[in-house]
Image (tube, grey):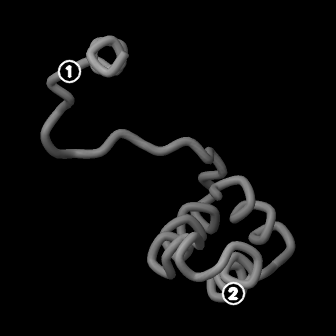
Amino acid sequence: FEEALLFCFNLKKSAAEARRLFEETYTIEHAPSKTICEDWFKRFRRGDFDTEDKERSGRPKTIEDADLQALLD
């Protein structure tokens, strides 16, 4: 949804308007939350247009994705 949120931002939509568009298109259950929309719009207003998720604080991964996928296969 990040790229679509950036598209809405560039169209001068507010975070609330973007959320409403997602709700109308994907239903409430599948739309990003109000908080997520607001957080992305804050990043865009700061000039951060990178739509990739940033590193987060907290517990680091203890297993690599490839190892997990091998266990699931």
Q: Quadrant of residue 32?
A: bottom right
- Compared to 1, does 62 lie above or below? above
* Vertical placement of residue 3 versus 58, above or below: below
Q: Tag 1's secondary structure?
A: loop
Left or right placement of residue 20 versus residue 73 in this view:
right
Residue ID at (63%, 56%): 2
Q: Earlier in the sequence, mark 1 or mark 2?
A: 2
Residue at the location (77% across, 81% down)?
13
Task: Say which quarter of the image contains residue 66.
Answer: top left
Q: Say which of 20 and 45 sits in front.
A: 20
Q: Position of residue 12 (x, y in %)?
A: 81, 78
Question: On the rendered image, what quadrant is the C terminus found in?
Answer: top left
Image location (x, y in percent) of residue 43 = 55, 62
Residue 11 place in picture, x, y as percent: 86, 73
Specify the amino acid type for callout 1.
Ile
- Residue 44 is situated, as x and y percent measured from the top left of the image, at 63, 62
Residue type at tag 2 = Arg
Q: Which residue is mark 1?
A: 63
Residue wearing tag 2: 20
Outermost residue on the front side: it is 73
Q: Determine the residue positioned at 59% across, 73% down.
A: 31
Residues 49 and 21: in front is 21
**Residue 45 or 38: which is nearer the viewer?**
38
Q: Is residue 50 left or right of residue 6?
A: left
Other-residue count near label 2 (Cα within 10 Å), few / some / many at <14 / 14–19 / ≥20: some
